[in-house]
Amino acid sequence: MLSTILAIPLFAMLIGYTAYFGRALYARAAIEEAAAAGARFAVTSLSGEHGCRQAQEAMQIVLEGYHLDPTSAALVVQPLSGWGRGVRVEVTASYPVAALPSLFFSRMLGDPEVRARYEVVVDRYANRYSNGWQPCTTAQTPV
């Protein structure tokens, strides 16, 4: 009887941690895919303004496909120097992984973020205009 009373909370914690870890891995896969899609769309666009907007839209669509809220993610697209052919563009995406509120140990876990970062070169042949880059970002909202 005593061993059962002691084992039940341990099993509950084990199941909770496993679920939390699974959620974090799922969010990590989604963020990696979103950042990769954003990088692809940013560097093959005709201009900096279009590249930024297309990258943002692509990342949001990927997150929606994974059933994650794109408004909770921080999605940033910016060049490492002025816009132009051959310039390196940095695409970063982060998403908070909230612990399940019903679990009694959620305060111990905290709310970490999963992040992905890609640095890619603007395509020399697809980029036709040098009309400048408008850095774009979506502000992260609290979960």
Image (tube, helix red, strand yellow):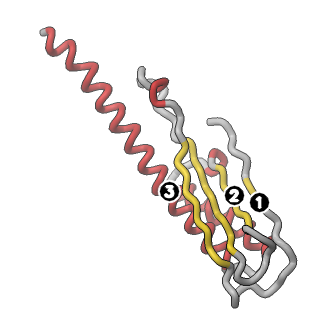
Residue at the disc numbered 2: 76
- What residue did someone put label 3 on? 30
The image quarter in which residue 125 lies:
bottom right
Residue 61 image-quadrant placement: bottom right
- Give the residue type at disc 1: Cys
Q: Is residue 42 above or below residue 6?
A: below
Q: Are dots 2 and 1 in contact, CB under 8 Å?
A: yes
Residue at disc 2, secondary structure:
strand
Which of the two labelled residues, at mark 2 and mark 1, occupies the earlier sequence position?
A: 2
The residue at 72%/52% (across/down) is: 138
Q: Which mark is residue 136?
A: 1
Residue at left offset 63%, top offset 58%: 92
Among the two numbered marks 3 and 1 on one chain, the one whose residue lies closer to the N terminus:
3
Distance, label 2 to label 1, CA atoms, is 6 Å
Q: Quadrant of residue 47?
A: bottom right
Three-letter amino acid code of the residue under disc 3: Ala
Marks 3 and 2 sit apart, C-alpha to C-alpha, by 15 Å
What is the crowding at mark 1: few (fewer than 14 residues within 10 Å), some, or many (at least 20)?
some
Q: Is residue 106 above or below residue 53?
A: above
Give the side of residue 101 with respect to residue 135, left or right.
left
> Which of labels 3 and 2 is toward the front?
2
Residue type, label 2 = Val
- Residue, far front: 81
Q: Residue 115: x and y, percent?
A: 55, 52
